[in-house]
Image (cartoon, rainbow, N blue to C red):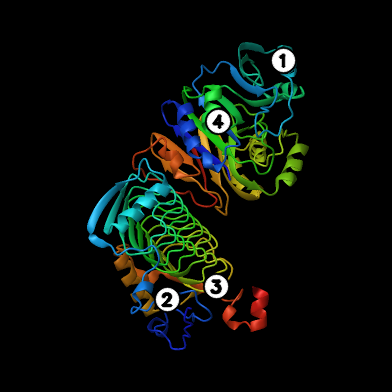
């Protein structure tokens, strides 16, 4: 089933970590195999923030293979060494969990493709996100558990999207959890509710164009599809509109960039979405109770129609 | 044992050309004999007094607890119940099988007012997916917007949304009337079998797709017609009925019903009435 939620404050920052946690926790009955956050925080914009993992969460319910922590340490060392070889500098590093790390990196090149490829060539290493504002945090468990594990409740930012997952198309692990980074584009993330039925056809075509897939989760296709469209010169909104015919199946998805938040709904309108929109705030989720967690007062909400694409700027 | 009624005589509505369907076959409807007092009421229904009014704040209650409390209040004879702070909770106000004046001061989540038979419900906010599913009788009025599958499989009653609704409004409906003040999404009237839908605004693609019978009236633009949905002539009696219905629904007071489009089933896909018994078996 899965639940998705997103919000964007227009013209100001807020405690988006705590707000998104409340929204996703309200949707936990839609799935709590894993929960993911894509948070766009306040930064000075100088350094890249790279969230990556060197292993999987092998806790209860996980479909991953158990590995020794020393394996994680070894992978981290190779990552550190590769970063230096790429001409980048680690300004700050945090190891939240043995398998999950956050680096602030001084890197001057705009093209992240070579950098990302070199890092992900290291077996067992996956970049969850890279950008000057975006941080993707995803792990097994419900929204509250993940928020507490990564201390996300104090994160200040302008916008965020998140996902409460009931695993159906692929395993219960971090690599299949949402949000997906729009590799190799800085600060692009995607969450999806639904099923895509032309996944393999699209995947083969995109891989032939040099695009990278890290999981077998059908939702990852949306991030890769949009990234390829943008690489070919399309705007985010143009790519989203093309996806309505390019992607087959049922879907409602959100995509966020450094300064915008968008939604798209398939032409069958088969997946739910409730939307609240004002000059100060846009909040949306699979169910109204998600929006109510940040706006308990009486508000006007609506369901976007079939085939609708909307994009808001901060 | 339920009676089987054969309808050979034209009803007044049929004589006026309002609908062509003829009820045949077995029915699950139970016919009550007023002389048999013990069989006169549904199980779990109450005789309520509309003048006996109370408020119920459900802010800190689960949907199940809130519904139990509504049932408890009805058992005490309360006929007007005002629900405070529904805050988008799912499945509120379901399974009410007697007359009741139920008012929600706020919005409902999914599956609100499901499987009801008789109450008059007013929702001062918005409703989520599948509102009033399987409604048998009564009246439900939504002041703001509604989600998808609005009035799915209703058998009777009036369902009124003053705002806009999502996709698949009236899917599989078998009777009753759905009235929309604003726009409606894709697949409105999908697989509808009987009943009527009135939309004052625009509708999305595939209107009336695979409809068996029933009638859809549209005041605005139509995205596209679904399989087997065709235009039909808007008669004088249609217009009179539309005016009366809109007046009762307190909606579209000055709406010009003469310009509405009437959409019915072409009956090219499946028309059970014209099938031979052996073909019916194959169709099922």
Residue closer to the observer: B276 or B144: B276
According to the picture, the residue beneath numbered tag 3 turns out to be: B212
- Which image quadrant: the N terminus of chain A? top right
Callouts 1 and 3 close, C-beta under 8 Å: no
Q: Where on the picture, by quarter, is residue A60?
A: top right
Write down the chain letter for disc 3: B
Label 1 crowd (10 A; few <14 / some 14-19 / many >=20): some
Q: Is residue B12 left or right of residue B279?
A: left
Helix, strand or loop for disc 3: loop
**With respect to residue A62, does B238 lie above or below?**
below
**Residue labelled with disc 1:** A73
Instruction: Confirm or deny contact between disc 3 and disc 4 (CB under 8 A).
Output: no
Q: Can the viewer see residue A258? A: no
| Mark 4 → mark 2, Cα distance in angstroms | 53 Å
Same chain for the residues at labels 2 and 3, yes or no?
yes
Residue found at x 33% / y 76%: B240
Q: Position of residue A35 (x, y in %)?
A: 57, 33
Q: Looking at the image, is mark 2 or mark 3 earlier in the sequence?
A: 3
Q: Residues within 10 Å of mark 4 (few under 14, many from 20)?
A: many
User: Residues under labels 1 and 3: Cα distance?
Assistant: 65 Å
Q: Between tags 1 and 3, which lies in front?
A: 1
Disc 4: which residue: A37
Q: CA distance from mark 1 to mark 2?
A: 76 Å
**Residue situated in front as seen by the camera: A14 or A111:** A14
- Percent x, y of residue B252: 32, 63
Mark pair 4, 1: CA separation: 25 Å
């Amino acid at each position: 089933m899965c639940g998705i939620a997103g919000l964007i404050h227009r013209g100001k920052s807020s405690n988006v970590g705590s707000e998104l946690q409340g929204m996703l926790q309200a949707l936990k009955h839609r799935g709590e195999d894993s929960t993911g956050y894509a948070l766009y925080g306040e930064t000075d914009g100088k350094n890249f923030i790279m969230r990556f993992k060197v292993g999987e969460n092998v806790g209860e319910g996980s479909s991953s293979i158990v590995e020794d922590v020393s394996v994680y340490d070894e992978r981290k060392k190779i990552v550190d060494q590769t970063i230096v070889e790429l001409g980048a500098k680690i300004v700050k590093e945090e190891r939240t969990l043995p398998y999950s790390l956050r680096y602030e990196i001084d890197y001057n090149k705009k093209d992240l493709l070579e950098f990302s490829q070199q890092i992900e060539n290291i077996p067992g290493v996956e970049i969850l996100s890279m950008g000057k504002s975006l941080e993707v945090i995803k792990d097994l468990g419900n929204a509250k558990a993940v928020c507490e594990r990564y201390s996300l409740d104090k994160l200040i930012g302008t916008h965020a999207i998140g996902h409460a997952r009931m695993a159906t198309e692929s395993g219960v692990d971090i690599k299949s959890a949402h949000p997906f980074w729009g590799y190799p584009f800085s600060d692009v993330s995607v969450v999806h509710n639904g099923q895509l039925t032309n996944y393999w056809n699209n995947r083969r075509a995109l891989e032939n164009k040099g695009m990278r897939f890290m999981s077998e989760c059908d939702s990852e296709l949306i991030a890769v599809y949009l990234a390829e469209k943008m690489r070919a010169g399309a705007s985010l909104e143009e790519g989203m509109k093309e996806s309505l015919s390019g992607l087959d199946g049922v879907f409602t998805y959100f995509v966020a960039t450094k300064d915008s938040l968008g939604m798209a709904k398939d032409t069958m309108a088969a997946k739910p979405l409730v939307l609240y929109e004002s000059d100060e705030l846009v909040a949306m989720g699979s169910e109204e109770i998600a929006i109510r967690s940040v706006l308990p007062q009486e508000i006007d909400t609506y369901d976007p129609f079939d085939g609708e694409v909307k994009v808001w700027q901060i | 044992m339920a009676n089987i009624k054969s309808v050979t005589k034209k009803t007044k509505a049929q004589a006026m050309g309002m609908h062509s369907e003829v009820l045949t076959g077995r029915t699950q409807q139970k016919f009550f004999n007023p002389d048999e007092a013990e069989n006169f009421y549904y199980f779990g229904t109450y005789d309520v007094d509309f003048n006996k009014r109370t408020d119920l704040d459900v802010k800190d209650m689960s949907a199940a607890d809130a519904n139990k409390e509504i049932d408890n209040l009805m058992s005490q004879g309360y006929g007007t119940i005002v629900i405070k702070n529904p805050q988008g909770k799912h499945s509120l106000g379901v399974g009410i099988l007697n007359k009741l004046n139920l008012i929600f001061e706020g919005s409902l989540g999914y599956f609100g007012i499901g499987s009801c038979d008789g109450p008059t419900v007013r929702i001062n906010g918005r409703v989520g997916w599948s509102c009033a599913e399987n409604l048998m009788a009564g009246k439900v009025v939504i002041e703001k917007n509604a989600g998808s599958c609005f009035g799915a499989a209703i058998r009777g009653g009036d369902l009124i949304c003053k705002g806009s609704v999502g996709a698949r409004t009236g899917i599989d409906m078998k009777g009753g009337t759905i009235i929309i003040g604003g726009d409606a999404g894709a697949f409105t009237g999908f697989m509808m079998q009987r009943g009527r839908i009135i939309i004052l605004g625009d509708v999305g693609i595939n209107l009336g797709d695979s409809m068996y019978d029933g009638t859809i009236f549209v005041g605005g633009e139509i995205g596209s017609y679904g399989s087997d949905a065709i235009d039909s002539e808007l008669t004088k009696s249609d217009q009179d009925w539309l005016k009366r219905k809109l007046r009762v629904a307190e909606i579209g007071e000055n709406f010009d019903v003469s310009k509405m489009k009437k959409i019915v089933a072409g009956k090219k896909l499946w028309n059970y009435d014209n099938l031979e018994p052996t073909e019916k078996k194959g169709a099922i």
